[in-house]
Structures are given as structure tokens and as C-alpha cells.
């Protein structure tokens, strides 16, 4: 193998030497032609103008002939052509390798940029989904919160109404038991007989008196007074006034109102 490589290298060196020699010969011929052209130009300056025109025509014709001629190789030696072609292919191969390396580097850089952009897009998409889920959850919680607040308020109102009804029932039962209406016949003790009244008058109970005073105060707070008539039993009216539960009108003694407890 080593002998074959050495023989190949020696043949290539010999082929290059032959090619260089032929190039030198062609260069010498070219230089000779150039000197002749310069000399001809110098002589043409001394000739007449018609000779210069003839010279120009001849040169033009020769130029056309050279343009129509096909270029010939400097040498037809297979070894020389193989060595030159091999060197040219190696140079072209090196250039293509450099182009491939640059293209590969650019491709790797673009892949990195693409991967970074895809990662950024995935992160933004994940953040967007999280924000959308949070907005949806907050909307549901808000709707649920409003509904729960409304239901809780209704429940409290109902409980308050029930409690108020129970208090009114207890108050009515307590007043009916301890503060009954007087006996129209005046039967009983001396104190009860003194409090007897006309049976034709339809007296209202103490519970109803207090209820009227309360409703009047809540419905018309600017005019909370209730006018007393024969249906108000005087002892109960007096009891409310003496215990600071009710108070009279400063200008009309027939009107009373519920005392302010705040």
C-alpha cells in the first residue's frame, strides 16, 4: 500500500511538472505575441492612415477566428488531467464542506431559536389557561357567593319573622293571662267591681293596645300618636303612662304614643 501511495504521489508530481512546463511555454508564446503587437502598433503610428485601417480589419478578422475556435487542452496526458481534476475536486470538496458546516451551524441555531420559541409559547399558553380557569372559578364563586348571601339573608329574615311571631304570641298569652279584660257584671272583689264598665262598649285588650302603638310608630314615625277612645280601657292606658311605656301628646291628652326606648 505504501509503495502504491508513493508511486501515485510521484506520478502526480511528474504530471504537475509537465503541466507547469507547458504553461510556461504557452506563457512565453503569449508574451512573444504581445511584443509583436506592441511593435506593430509602434510601426503603425508612422504609416499612413489607410494602412492602420487595413491592420484593424485584419486584427478584427483574426479575433473572429479565435472566437470561433474551440479551446484545446494544454495536454492530453491522462495522468496530468487526473492530477489536475483530483486537485480541483479536492478544492471544491473543501469549499462544499465549509458551506455545509456553515449551513449546519445556522440550522442548529435556528433549531435552538425554534425550541426556545416553542417553550415560550407553551409557558404563555399554560399561563393563559391558568388565568382563564381562575376567572371561571372566580365567576362561579361570585355567583355562588351572591346566591348564598341572598339565601342567608332570606333565612335570617324568616328566622326573625318566626322569632317575632313567637315573641308576639308569648306576649299576647302573658298579657291575656295577667291583664285580662274587666268583667262587665262587676263580679269578684271590691277592686274589680270598682273597675266595672259598660258592657255595650267593645274594649280592646292590652295586647292590642300595645300592637297599635307599635305599628303606628313603625308605619308613620313622623306621627306616632294614636287617638284613644272608649275602646281603650282607662286603667290600662294609665298603667302604660305611669310605667313610661307610653306618653301623651303635649297638646292633645286624648292621643298617646309609644315611648322612645333608644
Image (cartoon, rainbow, N blue to C red):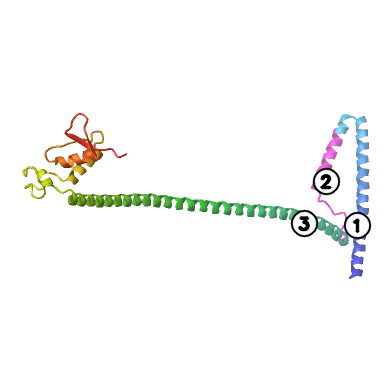
Q: Which residue is mark 2?
A: 66
Q: Relative to the observer, which residue lies in front, 21 or 69?
A: 21
How many callouts does the rendering have? 3
Q: Relative to the observer, which residue lies in front, 111 or 255?
A: 255
Image coordinates of residue 94 in percent, x first then y, are 80, 56
Image coordinates of residue 61 in percent, x first then y, are 82, 41
Q: Which residue is mark 1?
A: 16
Q: Is residue 175 left or right of residue 262?
A: left
Q: What residue lies at 37% left-to-right and 52% top-to-bottom?
A: 148
Quadrant assignment, res 195: top left
Secondary structure beneath disc 2? helix
Quadrant assignment, res 115: bottom right
* Of the two numbered discs 3 and 2 in the rendering, the one whose residue sits closer to the viewer: 3
Q: Which residue is at the far front?
A: 190
Q: Is residue 95 left or right of residue 40?
A: left
Q: Relative to the observer, which residue lies in front, 243 or 247?
A: 243
Q: Which residue is mark 3?
A: 97
Q: Which residue is at the far bottom?
A: 1
Q: Quadrant of the N terminus?
A: bottom right
Image coordinates of residue 234 in percent, x first then y, are 15, 40
How far is disc 3 from disc 2 in space, using C-alphas?
A: 38 Å
Quadrant assignment, res 38: top right
Q: Quadrant of the C terminus?
A: top left
Asked if disc 3 and disc 1 are in contact, CB closer than 8 Å, the reply is: no
Image coordinates of residue 172 in percent, x first then y, are 20, 50
Which residues fall within the magenta stretch?
53-77
Amino acid at each position: 500500500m505504501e509503495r502504491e501511495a508513493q508511486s501515485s504521489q510521484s506520478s502526480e508530481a511528474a504530471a504537475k511538472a509537465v503541466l507547469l512546463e507547458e504553461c510556461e511555454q504557452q506563457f512565453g508564446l503569449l508574451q512573444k505575441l504581445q511584443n509583436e503587437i506592441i511593435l506593430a502598433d509602434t510601426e503603425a503610428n508612422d504609416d499612413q492612415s489607410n494602412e492602420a485601417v487595413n491592420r484593424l480589419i485584419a486584427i478584427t478578422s483574426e479575433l473572429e477566428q479565435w472566437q470561433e475556435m474551440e479551446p484545446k487542452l494544454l495536454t492530453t496526458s491522462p495522468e496530468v488531467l487526473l492530477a489536475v481534476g483530483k486537485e480541483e475536486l479536492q478544492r471544491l470538496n473543501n469549499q462544499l464542506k465549509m458551506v455545509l458546516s456553515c449551513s449546519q451551524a445556522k440550522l442548529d441555531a435556528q433549531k435552538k431559536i425554534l425550541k426556545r420559541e416553542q417553550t415560550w409559547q407553551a409557558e404563555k399558553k399554560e399561563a393563559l389557561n391558568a388565568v382563564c380557569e381562575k376567572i371561571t372559578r372566580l365567576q362561579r364563586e361570585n355567583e355562588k357567593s351572591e346566591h348564598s348571601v341572598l339565601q342567608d339573608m332570606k333565612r335570617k329574615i324568616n328566622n326573625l319573622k318566626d322569632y317575632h311571631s313567637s315573641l308576639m304570641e308569648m306576649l299576647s298569652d302573658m298579657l291575656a293571662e295577667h291583664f285580662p279584660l274587666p268583667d262587665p257584671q262587676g263580679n269578684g272583689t271590691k277592686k274589680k267591681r270598682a273597675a266595672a264598665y259598660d258592657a255595650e262598649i267593645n274594649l280592646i285588650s292590652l295586647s292590642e293596645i300595645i300592637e297599635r302603638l307599635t305599628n303606628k310608630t313603625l308605619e308613620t314615625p313622623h306621627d306616632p300618636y294614636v287617638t284613644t277612645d272608649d275602646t281603650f280601657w282607662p286603667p290600662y292606658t294609665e298603667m302604660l303612662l305611669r310605667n313610661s311605656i307610653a306618653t301623651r301628646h303635649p297638646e292633645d291628652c286624648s292621643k298617646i304614643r309609644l315611648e322612645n326606648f333608644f
